[in-house]
Image: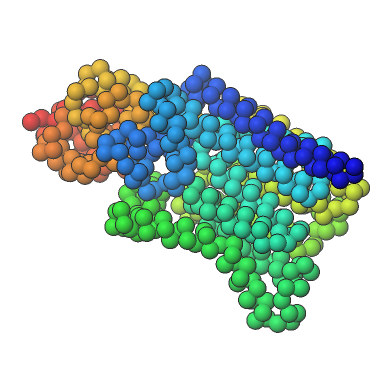
Amino acid sequence: MSEGKHYLKKEKKIRIDWIVFIFLFAVETAYGVYLGYFKGVLLGDAVSRTANAFYVLFCKPYRFTSMGLVWNPLPSMLQLPFVALAKLWYPFVTKGIGAAVVSALFAAWEGKTLMRTFDLLKIDRLPSLLLTLLFCLNPYVFFYGANGMSEIIYVAFAVQIVCSLSLWMRKGGGSHLIAVAVGFVGMFLTRYEAIPFAIAVALGMCVQILFSQRERKYYPANDLKESFYYVEGSMWVTFFPLIYSVLVWIFYNWSITGNPLYFMNSGYSMSAYSDYYTSYGGFAGAFGYVWARIWPFLIVFCGLLAVRLMAGTFLQPDSLIITVVTLGLSAFQFFMIANGKSGGYVRYLCYPLMLAAAWIPYQLSVLKDGKRKAAAILMSVVLACNGLYFLWAFRYSPLMREDTLLMVPANSEQVADYINSYLKNDRVLMDSYRTYYIIMNVNNVDNLVVSCSPDFEKAVKDPVKNNIDYLVAPQIGSYGNMDALNIAYPNLYWHGEKWCQEVTSIGEYKIYKVLK
């Protein structure tokens, strides 16, 4: 009988994971549809990821390489089924619904992962559920779970990695390191910041192996060579899949473009755009800039440190591990911002909130019952207060609203309407770097010559010879400077060229008729 009760209790706890998943997926999807379809909130980077998938299935010849090799492919790959459904209902792509479903899926998985980790570390169900929901329903986290951006996919993998790392620290076992390895593969396929985060996790693992009593039994004491071998073996198990993924990505870039580092140094890369980033005055100026944006994301981390201080464990090695893993990405972003290599957006600095929350199950598990209850109450209060702050900040703080204003380029739909009305039978040339949302709203995509078209480079070089009827150029300045037409013809936008004639101007875009 006792075994039967234990079985039922276990089943009930596992079901809570899925209840959390289903609940979060439903509310995040609903909010995403509300934002995109009813409110028209379409963030540029999110729609760009959709556009990359759109080119695969809508631009001839249909080929996977049309997705491009600058942004990591996973967010766009996951949207391919919804892009296919767009042939039946266009809002899947033009209103960001497919992207919202994908981000909602990862937001839900993130909550399930956190709840499951609480369960595996024997934390009571009620505080576990409360802490999980306080984190997942934090307005900042919730917004990114619904808006189709790649941040929530990256964060979900980061939460998996931290949770698996903490399970390894508490329980040991190679399976948890394998889960970390899988998380890093998914993370790299989402964002390049997987590499600096891997360095932070590797440092944390070294501290754990060298100072943990559990790990010391696996190699002889006072034997530097054997300890090195154990560290090396653990690192290979954990990070070889990530290294392999990076090498495969480099090989794909080389085999397709002839440039193995195309994703890093091409004209469309973030490295190329870094020439237009704002200078923040070196390290001194960057510190003030970063601090003004990052401090709200450090509150949960400070709560963790306060718990450790009150529990008398502040000076233990795992405090160093938690700190390095939680702040490693922020240190990397600070370095990039100080050197003018990052846009310095708020979302690039949000990771301490998510990473610190992923450490809460571990932190509660190392405490005895009395202290555990007090710590759960304190962290609940911290998460609640942090959520209330972001609820206020999204409405009133200009800094926190920075990222919510980066919508798709204005007037894109009007340009598409003009093409649909007056140029529907003409070949129109445009670089998709700035015109991606125009392309997605054009009815006859077959008549467009865009960046993924086989004859794009030839058409840019000689529009007349390659039978181009019209071309669209964005305004010079910022993103417009990276447009292939503006690069090939620097005077085109302001002064025109002898082989074309301006037809109309719509917002930042000008449409030219090619003279033949």
In which quadrant of the rendered view does residue 178 lie? Answer: bottom right
Taking depth in this image into account, of 75 and 42 the one nearest to the observer is 75
Q: Position of residue 416 (x, y in %)?
A: 31, 23
In which quadrant of the rendered view does residue 126 lie? Answer: top right
Taking depth in this image into account, of 467 and 74 the one nearest to the observer is 74
Query: Exactly how many numbered labels are in the figure?
Result: 0
Residue located 76% across and 73% down the image = 217
Taking depth in this image into account, of 266 and 449 the one nearest to the observer is 449
Residue located 62% across and 56% down the image = 180
Q: Position of residue 118 (x, y in %)?
A: 76, 46
Vertical relation: 403 (above or below) 71:
above
Answer whether residue 302 is visible to the viewer in this image: no
Q: Farthest front residue?
A: 1
Vertical relation: 75 (above or below) 324:
above
Q: Quadrant of the C terminus?
A: top left
Vertical relation: 298 (above or below) 229:
above
